[in-house]
Image (tube, grey):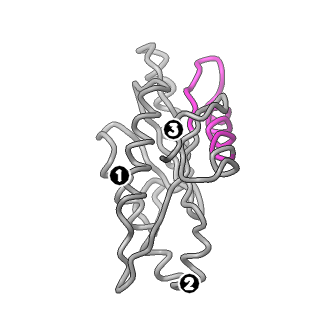
Amino acid sequence: RTDSLTGLLNRRGFLEKGEEEIERSRRSRKPFCVVMADADHFKRINDLHGHAAGDVALQLLGDLLRGSLRAQDLVARWGGEEFVLLLPETDLHGATQVAESIRRSVALLPLVVGQFEIPVTLSFGLAEHRPERGLEVTIAHADAALYRAKAEGRDRVVAHPSVPVFTPK
C-alpha cells in the first residue's frame, strides 16, 4: 500500500482510501476532487543525470506534494512520474487553487540533486467527484484533463470538463 521509493501511498493504497472517502462524502454531502499531476519531460532528467537522480527528483516531488497538502488530503505515486491527490471537502474551484499553488512552487524552485539544479514543472488535471459515479470514473476524468494540460503545452492546470483553469504567465 506504500510506494517504496517515495514513501507515499501506492495505487492500491490510494484506491482503498479513496473508497473510504466516497462513503464519507456521501454521508457528509460534501464534494471531493481528484488531481492527477505529472512531471513534465521527466525522461530528460533520467537521460541527462541518470536514474538515481530521477529517483531523488521523485522523492523530492513526493515530499513537496505531501508538504503542500492538509493532513486529511491523500497523495500517492500513481506510477512512473505521475502522482494522484484526493482533496476531501474540496470543490473544483478549491482544487484548482491548490493545484495552481503547487504548480507555481515547483516551477519556481528547481530540484537540487547532488551538484545539479534540475528545473522541473508539473502538469495537472483535476475532476470533482460526483456521487452517481465510481472513483475510477473521476480518476479517468482527471487523467483526461491531465492529457489536455500536456497537449496544451505542459506546466498548467486543467479541470474536467477540459476547460483550462490556469496557465502560466
What's the amino acid at mark 1?
A: Arg
For the residue pair 149 and 60, the one nearer the viewer reads as 149
Label 2 SS: helix
**Disc number at residue 48?**
2
Q: CA distance from mark 3 to mark 2?
A: 30 Å
Q: Residues within 10 Å of mark 1 (few under 14, many from 20)?
A: some
User: Where is residue 48 drawn, in percent x and y?
Assistant: 56, 84
What's the amino acid at mark 3?
A: Phe
Nearer to us: label 1 or label 2 = 2
Badge 1 or badge 2: first in the primary sequence: 2
As drawn, 167 above or below 96: below
The residue that disc 1 covers is: 66
Badge 3 or badge 1: first in the primary sequence: 1
The residue that disc 3 covers is: 166
Magenta-tinted stretch: 126-147
Q: CA distance from mark 3 to mark 1?
A: 22 Å
